[in-house]
Amino acid sequence: MTALTLAKPDDLERLLPLVAAFHAEEGIDDVDDSTRRAGVAPLLDGSPHGAIYIIGPVRAPIGYVCISFGWSLAFGGMDGFLDEIYIRPGVRGRGIGSDVLRSLPKALAGAGMKALHLEVHRDNSKARALYQSLHFEARDHYSLMSRYL
């Protein structure tokens, strides 16, 4: 099983390059280093709005996963959004992401989470197939919409 460790404030400088690499890979160009730091640091300080887990050894992480917490009347309690998951390119294809996405929902359910949501690009058939194999389903009649504030 792949090691998952709840990230702490001391992990900030190890996580920021991974987050920057994910953003570059995904074409998220409008986020600068100070914005990334402002997004990551509170989660490491114990914010009730989410958590970041280090994938692999804490001193030399191979990735991270970020979960945002919410509340849903329809799901009957706490839900979460898999905001980002990143695995270094050199270690992809070894089942690490699948392992993380099998173990993390079990842990979150044990903490009372009722549902875990994620967003995937419509054209990314490989990722969609992976998520479907891990029991994530598109919700009929629903599509994620966003408003920037």
Image: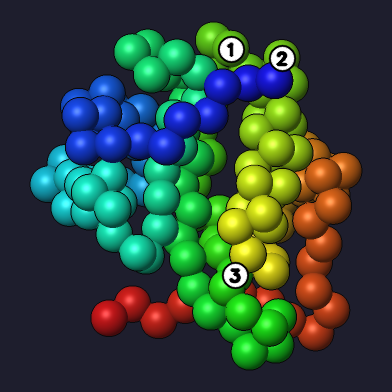
What residue sits right under mark 2 in the picture? 94
Measured in 3D between alpha carbons, the distance from the residue under mark 3 to the one under mark 1, in whole angstroms, is: 30 Å
Q: Nearer the viewer, residue 137 or 4?
A: 4
Proximity of marks 3 and 1: CB atoms separated by less than 8 Å: no
State the SS at label 1: helix
Crowd rating for badge 3 (residues with CA inside 10 Å; few <14, some 14–19, many 20+): many
Query: Farthest residue in the bottom direction?
Result: 73
The image shows residue 30 at horizontal and vertical percentages of 26, 53
Query: Farthest residue in the left direction?
Result: 34
The image shows residue 89 at horizontal and vertical percentages of 53, 17
The answer to which image quadrant residue 90 occupies is top right
Crowd rating for badge 2 (residues with CA inside 10 Å; few <14, some 14–19, many 20+): few
The image shows residue 140 at horizontal and vertical percentages of 84, 79
Residue type at tag 1:
Val
Proximity of marks 2 and 3: CB atoms separated by less than 8 Å: no
What residue sits right under mark 3 in the picture? 79
State the SS at label 3: strand
Looking at the image, residue 12 lies above or below residue 78: above
Proximity of marks 2 and 1: CB atoms separated by less than 8 Å: yes
> Is residue 103 rendered to the left or right of residue 78?
right
Crowd rating for badge 1 (residues with CA inside 10 Å; few <14, some 14–19, many 20+): few
**Which label sits in the foreground, 2 or 3?**
3
Q: Which label's residue is closer to the chain start, 2 or 3? A: 3
Q: Residue at x 17, y 53 (%)?
A: 38
Q: Residue at x 33, y 77 (%)?
A: 148
**Which label sits in the foreground, 3 or 1?**
3
Q: Which label's residue is closer to the chain start, 3 or 1? A: 3
What residue sits right under mark 1 in the picture? 91
> Is residue 27 rendered to the left or right of residue 71?
left
